[in-house]
Image (cartoon, coloured by chain):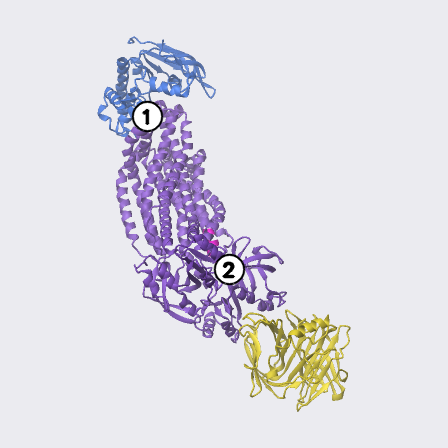
Amino acid sequence: MALLRFNHVSKLYSGAPALDDVSLDVERGQFVVLVGRSGCGKSTLLNVAGAMDFPTSGEVVLDGVVTSSLSETALTLLRRGTVGFVFQSFQLLPSLSVLENVELPLLLARRPRASETALDRLRQVEMEDYGARMPYQLSGGQMQRVAIARALVHSPALLLADEPTGNLDSTTGDVILKLLQNIARKQQTTILMATHSVEAAEIADVVVRLRDGRVQEVLEPASGP
Amino acid sequence: MAYQKIFYRLILRPLWRERLRSALMVATVALGVAVVLAIELAGEAAAGSFRSSVETLAGSGDFEVTATGGVPAEVLARLVLLPHAFKLRPRIEDYAVIAASNRVVPFLGVDMLADAGANPGNSGADEFQRGGSIWVGKDAGWKPGSRVRLTVNDGSADYTVRGVIEGAGEAIITDLAPAARLLGRGSNLDRILIDVPPSRPADQWESILRAALPDGMTLAPRGARTEENRRMLAAFRWNLRVLSYIALLVGAFLIYNTISVSVVRRREEIGVLRALGATRLSVLGAFLSEAACLGLAGGIAGVALGRVMATACLRLVAATVDSLYVSSTPAPIALTWAVAVAGIAIGVLVSVVSALPPALEASRVVPVEAMARGRRDHDVHMHRWRDLALGAALAVAAGLASRQPPVAGKPLFGYLAVLLLIGGAVLATPALVSVLSRATATAAGRIFGVEAMLASRSLAGSLRRTAVLVGALSTAIAMLSAVGIMVGSFRQTVLLWMEDRLRADLYLRPAGPAGADRHPTLAPGTAARLQRIPEVAAVDQFRAYEISYNGLPATLGGSDARIAGRYGQRPFLSGARPADVFAQLPGRDHVIVSEPFANKHGVKRGDTLELPLGGRRIHFRVIEIYGDYSNERGYIIMDRGTLLKYLPDPSPSNVAVYLRPGANLEQGRRAVENALAGRKVMVFTNRSLRKEAIRIFDRTFAITYALEAVAVFVAIMGVAGALLALVIDRRREFGLLRFLGASTGQIRRIILFEAGLLGLLAEIAGVALGYLLSLLLIYVINRQSFGWTIEFHWPVTVLLSALSIVYAATVLAALYPSQVATQLVPIEVIHED
Amino acid sequence: MKIRVLLFALEFYRAALPGYHYEFPRDHFNHPEFQTEWWYYTGNLRDTQGRRFGFELTFFRQGVDRGKEPAAMWDVRDVWLAHLALSDIDGGKFLHTERLNRSGPGLAGSSLAQARVWNGNWNVQWDLRTNTQQMQAIDPRFSFKLNLRALKPPVIHGLNGVSQKAEGLGRASHYVSFTRLETRGTVVLDGRTFMVEGLSWMDHEFFTHQLDAAQSGWDWFSLQFDDGTELMLFRLRRKNGTADPYSAGTYIDARGQTTRLARDTFSVTPGKLWNQYPVDWIVRVPSLGIEVELTTRLPQQEFESKQNRYWEGAVEIGGSRRGAGYLEMTGYAAPVPSIIKK
């Protein structure tokens, strides 16, 4: 069964459709890239996928449960266990050090051995030497690495990334994409990523093109598994 | 770019969008202004227009003649014969207690016969001669024919109201003859009011009158007594006024904080506006206008609120004035346009001045500056050590200021030291907050979980605003604890003093509420009657007179020195033994004076006081200074025999009864009461007198506590507002935390922890600062303005409970902001840009 | 009823009865055993420029309480009332004032020992050796200081030491006058000092309840003629409008010899009215060949007291003899106060 299934999902924002009858399966371990113009519904799709938002009609099944049926507590537990988020503008907490930022999801979920795990994740993004730094001391690429480490710290089954390279120059952006690709491969983490970047589409297992809230086409590039 | 547009975009729109925050700020200013105004109005009503209440019906005459122990009637006879067109009004002045309400009202004896000649329709020379006739002031509320029971001295009787007199307040008025008989005045008057014709200048009349008066009479321009009262009350009012400014100061902190926050928050917007052509001046003007608007609204609300609060304050202030200084009938509260405008102006001024630094900062934003908030906080990090050093320098300056003598009787340097200390503490706050919150973050995280860690981190992270907030709250807490410590120490000192001072078993005084300048007397035979009781070992009679010394009111007293020497134990301030000192009083023109008297008049041991007594000027040697806390006016005490020699009125004001060792207190008390059956005498046991004294003490300081409470309330309101702003400002962070798996409960806890931490930091800083301020209050300000020796005591219970309440209130103030935080929609706040 | 009141009063006070033995100077001063007593000074003065003044200074004493207990300092045993008036005849002004006092520590009184009658700083100090009196009266608007020298011995009016005023024993007063007092001194008015001289008249009466209830007032005349004689007349008016039979008078000739004038030996006829007061009179004493007209240049000499209203003023005399005098009219505008009449 797919890790994430969209079943005729529509989402209306003040009457206007942001998602319009989207049906889509994301299998475990897949690297799925959402492309489309600004405002085509990519972010909404990600929010709905991560149970931060819910469809107006249809249903989203994440890891076997219908997200809209869950209580607030269960949703929090779902986010703590199953989903990790990466944002365009990094969203590090400025008052926390790099290591503390990465630890944060584990601490919020009251998981043991938070700092060891966090250090481990920093190593994965090659930021282990920066654990004590404050976010403002980092470059954009470094911040996004830290953000990725944080998104992965609790080993989520699904990583949702919204334009992770949008605020980065292309070289740095490529590095970040590579990093995400590696992670998807090595950890079998499912990645759903919204992006403008053409390069991103190239490394994806599946490319979903959205237009006006509808799935226009689903491509599986040759380089897929 | 048009100023109006900037003002609209930068100021009006946000003000409207954040109505709650704006309302809180307006309320902050309003409370600050209200307290200042209320104290001003109440002070003016209680003390300003005041006039001792016996001034009733005194009119606006030119001179007055008074003398310790009374003005002999012959002086009046001498004055009426002078070949000048004087108008002379002899008066007997005392107080009566209305039995039904236990209110003290002036009881005046005037020459109703002479007045009948002056007032048409008031004829009937015999009517006022009839016993039991009284006339009353309009405010007393009786009609002619009413029967009224009055207690005068220790006797009580029914009187019939014969008429109502305009402009006499609540006073009870009779003719001289019944008044003199009732009060046992013999042929003495208390005052002669003199109106002089305008045909000569006042100083000529004064020398003519002086030449006609015998020695020992005090001739003063009319209103001298009111002037004396005013002077006496000046220090009291000053201190009250200063206390009332604390709430305003705390309010200023909060305005500074709020405007700072809005500048930081609107930095990008300011940058954009500057890029679009807004000048620096217009940005500065916009923010100052915001402050002015809030100040104006707060000022107007504050004036209205202040008028309401003044009524409540007046009761407290009047009680203090009455028990510490002088019998007063408060004037009605008069809110004039001038005062109202001044109140509003204070609101605007305080707001604008507090907003000036952040507004200046706003004007320095360079066009299209999109600077991260962290950067600015970083600046503060860099400055906090410099600020700490500056704070330390201010503390040193405060130490120096505290060693300066008073200026014109006012502890100006003491207040300066207080301000310097507060300033120093505020400057040290960022360092304190940053060090403490960082130091505790890990520990807090370990003990209370990640929420506590996040809370302390974010406090340290947004140091700029938290420091101001902690500064405001800790200033309020500091003043609260300082005043708490001062009053607590004072209370403890008084308790210890009473322990020693009150050694007799029973105390007697005429019934009715006590007042600092009222000395009703007991019948002359009282002591003799008590001495016949088998249980009684000794009776000490104390007689008090109101006098004026060096233009200030004081109390002259006579006590039986032999008895006082036998029972007194605690050494004098100099260390001398009571027995030795009291042995030097009888038979000699020797006195001891109380500490407030000595301080006020700069009197030292061995000095000589010249007192006009019984028509002579007598020189008394001050042989000792004793600690006294019963009133602020000061006492001169001599042996009863000496006093009787000059003022031969044997009626005592108070009587202290010592029982034989082993005698049963209850039996003794009953025997005393039986012996005085029919007289209106209050008999206190030692214990009940102390209780009564401490009750008066607490009542006296009620206003102080009330002022502090308002300041703390303002600070807590500020905390609520600031936390709300903090939540709105950090909504993205809270949204992010939700993305990262935080539950709404965790979000709520973070904010509550922040409030808790803020409160804790403020309390730590506040108590530390409060301790230092209390030293200034006790050893500098109180000493210089009142002259009391207060021993330092920690009022642990009071302080702990006050601090707990403040702490709980601070955390409770965070409930609403935390609720707002949990209701933020994460996806909206995280994508909003 | 009337009798009871009188008897009640007489428990405490003495009545004026015939046969009273006068003794001077004692009887010039206080008689507290009588309920009512007054010392009445009036006079006509002229300054060096001829400006005319009249003055009145009266000290009243009314006993209100004769309790048995010793009086305390402020107890009111006697009410001391004093009236003071200055008639600025050429200035067209009449200034008057009054004061009330108790004896107290010496606020008002009359004392042989001190040879003084006073109410505050309105006082008359006698020099008993020279029989002169120093008078002082001070008001914010005016004051005067006068030296009075008796040109004739005191006159005792009436018969057998009493001046009968109504039917009944004791309804009378002891009445003594100095009818010609040479007067010199100063008057201060509106800040100006006038050196004045002229003649004064002094009446002293003491009694207990002299009038009766049917009497409504009186007209009293003290006339000093330029030929050195004086005439005192009083006409008591009854409520029914008739003259009381107890109206009487005294004529003093230039050497001081007195003639008592009974009701039927003189007539007084009112003339022109000012308000209710007849301010012009014709006085006839046929036996003495006197027929004079009294006129005043200052009709508004009405004394408005808090207790009472009466007319008391300087008059000029023309006709068979010339001179000046004082005229008193009571009971026209207000009833005679109860202190005189019970």
Q: Nearer the viewer, residue B414 or B460?
A: B414
Q: Quadrant of the N terminus of chain B?
A: top left
Q: Which residues are magenta?
A: B40-53
Q: Chain C: give its colour.
A: yellow
The local secondary structure at tag 2 comes to loop
> Which SS does the magenta portion mostly show?
helix
Asked if the magenta segment contains residue B47, the reply would be yes
The local secondary structure at tag 1 comes to loop
User: Residue B553: in sight, yes or no?
Assistant: no
Image x and y of residue B144, in percent: 62, 58
Q: Quadrant of the C terminus of chain B?
A: top left
Q: Nearer the viewer, residue C296 or B222?
A: B222
Asked if the magenta segment contains residue B500, the reply would be no
**Crowding at mark 2 (Cα within 10 Å: few <14, some 14-19, many 20+):** many
Image x and y of residue B42, in percent: 47, 51
In which quarter of the view is residue C231 placed? bottom right
The kind of residue tagged 1 is Gln
**Residue closest to the far left:** A129
Q: Chain B: give its colour.
A: purple
Q: Is residue B38 above or below residue C160?
A: above
The kind of residue tagged 2 is Asp
Of all chains in the rendering, the one displayed in blue is A
Which residue is labeled 2 in the image?
Answer: B154
Q: Are marks 2 and 1 on the same chain?
A: no
Which residue is labeled 1 in the image?
Answer: A91
Count of numbered badges drawn on the protein = 2
Which chain is disc 2 placed on? B
Q: Residue at x 36, y 37 (%)?
A: B759
